[in-house]
Amino acid sequence: MREFTVPPMAAAPQVGGLADTVFDYAEDDPHRITLGRKDADGQWHDVTAAAFRDEVLALAKGLIAQGVRFGDRVGLMSRTRYEWTLFDFALWTVGAQSVPVYPTSSAEQVLWMLHDAEVAAVMVEHEDHAMTIGSVIDRLPNLKRLWQLDADAVTELVEAGAQIDDEVVHRHRRAVTPDSVATLIYTSGTTGRPKGCVITHANFMFESDTMVARWAPVFRSRPGDETATLLFLPLAHVFGRMVEVAALRGRVKLGHQPELSAKALMPDLVSFRPSFILAVPYIFEKVFNGARRKAEVEGRLGPFDKSVEVAVKYAEAMEERAFGTGPGPSAGLRMQHQFFDKVVYRKVRDAMGGRVRQAMSGGSGMARRLGLFFEGAGVTVYEGYGLTETTAAATANPPERTRYGTVGLPIPGTSVHIARDGEVWVHGANVFSGYLGDPGATDAVLRDGWLATGDLGALDEDGYLTITGRKKEILVTSGGKSVSPAGLEERVRAHPLVAQCIAVGNDRPYIAALVTVDQESVDHWLAIQGRAPMPVADLVRDPDLEMEVRRAVVAANTAVSQAESIRTFRILAHPFSEEHGLLTPSLKLKRKAIETAYAAEVDALYH
């Protein structure tokens, strides 16, 4: 199949903007809990729709008092926290445009984005961010204001706007139309300098309303059960912003967690108790690997691994029944599944707070087997695919017919087309209007309303999309063999010890790989062997560790031809990190940066 379209479910907005969501919500249901806010002692406090509306209104007055005007661009540089959502909706209330900046951005990256966007003001989280801005402020002639959250910026702004009449704010709000620009989100820069994606209020409204309507089992609670989600994705990323907007428009209780690490996240999942989460595959991998390590420590690895097999088989049988190719789980399999639900699967769900039954995954590919395990364990993970340019999801697996290993069908109201060279093209109301001030780059990807994504993929006979790689990441060996590295890398990462894998081989005689390992998993592996804890840096030449990684590589190679297989590898002392410029904030590999940083190690693989 070359093209597939799904009819729309959400009507295109005719009037208004995103801020109306907050005011309409407070008018309709003022006492309903809208957000959860964590205090300095780690306690969660409820925020009603009316209370949030009042905070947005007060902050919007302050923004006007301090010179923010309709159409101005304001930078937001912070981790994921309550105040970001507050600022977003206050800015949209006055008709301003937010410009997210990743909190780990370097001074040069900050300079480029703020200068390119001609930002008039910036909200930062803390003093380090303020110092980063300060180091380049002499080259930002349009920047007039800097507010710091940890220096009580919200109170400062609210006090500044206390004398402004409500009607002044509402006049600004009523002037916003669906085609007004809501935000400029800069691409992660995996293939060059970040470009500012111009995303409108209509883009966000269509995207979020479509997700809420089509994935009603996720966003709509059962009677007597509160729907809630904990947002831990970076709000500087389009996926996080879509969650923020969809939660408010879908009337889902929203909490914020500023760290994407499993160590920081897991306790908040337990205390906030979301009913669903939206995450990247890394989180699901961490939950699974943590459960497996715990079982091994308790001497129950055999039963745990058996429970995994049962979960996968059960989910496969349910998948076959959904697509009309099988009768569903047998009586014996159902009995085994019920047993393991009590002794294993419930504990996996408890690690995510105990209430999670639905989840969405994006940002990178999830292994089919991992998705099947979670389905069998009672948590349906809807994997999807999208870009900044598509305002998050362009495709996602539907609730009643999830096909694991794919990124699903086009979301309602969109079309997916596979070009002759295998490139994925997307058409729909979620597609952005172009790159700021760069008509050449815009024309290169927008063709008669179709977005050329740069990703390679295939549609199956039912219209489900599988992403096979990225055009710019195809490796071509010196023998002329073209290899898409994504699948190989994903299979290597399936090993519990492996954290990251990057295949190399452009203009080289064969494919090789750089591998990093997870320190927590290594500590567990050493303990099981009766060995003392040791930093990974001291283990990169350890023959037993090399043997474990070799098993992962051999397993990955079984799925490809010899010419596409990984012939050799090297274990690195340290993982690739965002702080060192080797990962994007959504944890994608920056291939060129990694190959440059580890040029000596790559060369050694071929000598």
Image (cartoon, rainbow, N blue to C red):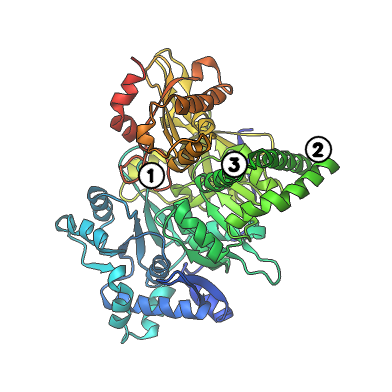
**Residue 220 as seen in the image, left or right of residue 507:** right
Kindly identify the amino acid type of the residue bearing the numbered disc 2: Gly
Q: CA distance from mark 2 to mark 1?
A: 41 Å
The residue lying toward the viewer, choosing from 136 and 459, is 136
Question: How far across and down, in percent of the image, does residue 354 sit?
Answer: 62, 60
Q: Is residue 217 above or below residue 551?
A: below
Circles 3 and 2 in contact, beta carbons < 8 Å: no
Kindly identify the amino acid type of the residue bearing the numbered disc 1: Thr
Determine which residue is flagged by label 3: 296
Determine which residue is flagged by label 1: 584
The residue lying toward the viewer, choosing from 535 and 266, is 535
| Residue 297 occupies quadrant | top right
* Mark 2 element type: loop
* Mark 1 element type: loop
User: Dividing the image into 4 quarters, which one contains the N terminus?
Assistant: top right
Let me know if residue 203 appears in the view.
Answer: no
Counting residues from the start of the chain, the first of labels 2 and 1 encountered is: 2
Task: Give the total of numbered labels.
Answer: 3
Q: CA distance from mark 1 to mark 3?
A: 33 Å
Q: CA distance from mark 3 to mark 2?
A: 34 Å
Kindly identify the amino acid type of the residue bearing the numbered disc 3: Glu
